[in-house]
Image (cartoon, grey):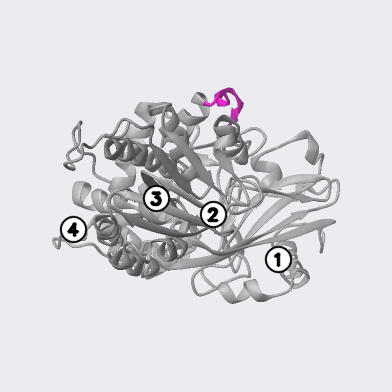
Amino acid sequence: MTANGDAPTVVVIGGGVSGLATAYRLTKADPSIDVVVLEANDRPGGKLRSVQVGDLVLPSGADSFLARKPWAVQLCKELGIGDELVAPGATGAHLWTERGLVAMPKQAPFGIPGDIGQVFSWPGLSRAGRRRAALDLLKKKRRDDSDETLGSLLRRRLGGEATDRAVAPLLAGLYAGDIDRLSVRATFPDLERWESWQGSLIRGAQAANRQSRKSDPGPMFVRPRDGVDRLTDALAIDLGFRVRTHSFASAIDATDGRHRVTLGDETTIDADAVIVSVPAHEASRLVEDPAPAAAADLAGIAYASTGVVLMVYAEGSQPSLPEGTGFVVPRGAAPMTAATWLSSKWPSDAFGTRAVVRCYIGAVGEEDILDADDADLIAACAKHLAALVRLPDMPEHAAVVRWPKAMPQYELGHLDLVARIRRSLPEGIFVVGQAYDGVGIPDCVRAAGETAEAVVAHLQRDPAGLSNDEETVR
């Protein structure tokens, strides 16, 4: 309840996984809260979507989530779809090289081998590259306590060849980013801890492997059997009438602790709190009037445009795919940045004996490829695949999905930038989503819970501005 005893209204702008999960948490924390989710598109779910390719429905966004971060798995269980979670049907990946595909080292968290023998024998690097990477075991650890870029840390410890040819394609690919601009602390803080704790990334990987074996964590990735968008569908079903599609929010006004959200059709909704769960550049537009400083910082969060090329090959083609889940590509070496054997990773009777492949395209510095025609993108990806594995020259069915300005870039100083944004927002306006606290689905779900707690604390404040409970940091 608000301080005057009325049932509070909370507006959530954006119906992706972050917005839906935050709304869900609010309804469970206090059923009296009137929660309204505004989604501009014709369906909620954000980038967790599927697309029809021939007779198959295939993921055009994320195809799984990290199980070892428990928040998404726990949410699935709460929603009654926990028993639908399945592990991949294949594990292990390959690296694209000029000599063909090379299997990535096993037991290599973040692509860094924890087995010394693999460091000296892995064929994905030259002898000189392997020797330089092994110097990580001897080099002194960094004493400077400031943040650094992912590229700086990796090159300093492992050398340029191992960084650019082996580790960067995996780590930078998760952000569609440039390792020489991404912040270690905002993206892979474990790497910094490994150096500080073990004095070496290789020894850090060894220690991580030992801990993993002791804890028996189970599969690294899981997804609902029918696809990741099953999670957002279940959230939307639980929220029911609270989710309003075709509802574009055009502005937020803040006066005397109350907020007014204006929609595209000029209707308005008065709210006690507003949660902005849209990309940072859209959030910047919404908060420009009540919070110009936060708006400027939000506009400063860079984004990369990406896409996927989904290809379904003829019956009998699945045995042509190598074991594993697919491959990653060093920067600029091929039209795709990575490829997933969907028919191996998520086997289904619907696939029959057909190879089903998803190629990832676009990234920071490689976004021009998205301007090409669909037919040219499909032909380019198919040509490179046929040169790597014994697939037909062209698939029987294919589709291209583009995601403009889809992947936020956690550049150096990102954590400080996010903290400043939140300090600059007026009381009662909150931001949540991929741009702030982690790009993965589990991180978005975790941040959604934390945001819901902060909103409840805000609603419980008395007229003097004090919280009835311990203050929660937004």
- Residue labelled with disc 3: 438
Q: Residue at x 52, y 29 (%)?
A: 76
Local crowd at mark 2 within 10 Å, few (<14), some, or many (≥20)?
few
Q: Amino acid at mark 2?
A: Thr
Looking at marks 2 and 4 on the same chain, the residue that comes earlier in the sequence is marked by: 4
Q: Are marks 1 and 4 in contact (CB under 8 Å)?
A: no
As measured in the structure, the alpha-carbon distance from the residue carrying label 2 to the one carrying label 1 is 46 Å
Q: Quadrant of the N terminus?
A: top left
Give the secondary structure at mark 1.
helix
Whether residue 118 can be seen here:
no
- Residue labelled with disc 1: 381
Q: Residue at x 41, y 58 (%)?
A: 252
| 3 vs 1, front mark | 3
Whether residue 68 can be seen here:
yes
Looking at marks 3 and 4 on the same chain, the residue that comes earlier in the sequence is marked by: 4
- Residue labelled with disc 4: 141
Q: Which mark is residue 267?
A: 2
Local crowd at mark 3 within 10 Å, few (<14), some, or many (≥20)?
some
Stretch in magenta: 79-87
As measured in the structure, the alpha-carbon distance from the residue carrying label 2 to the one carrying label 3 is 33 Å
Looking at marks 3 and 1 on the same chain, the residue that comes earlier in the sequence is marked by: 1
Q: Are marks 2 and 1 in contact (CB under 8 Å)?
A: no
In the rendered image, residue 445 lying in the magenta stretch gets the answer no
Query: x, y percentage for residue 133?
Result: 34, 61
Query: x, y percentage for residue 235?
Result: 55, 34
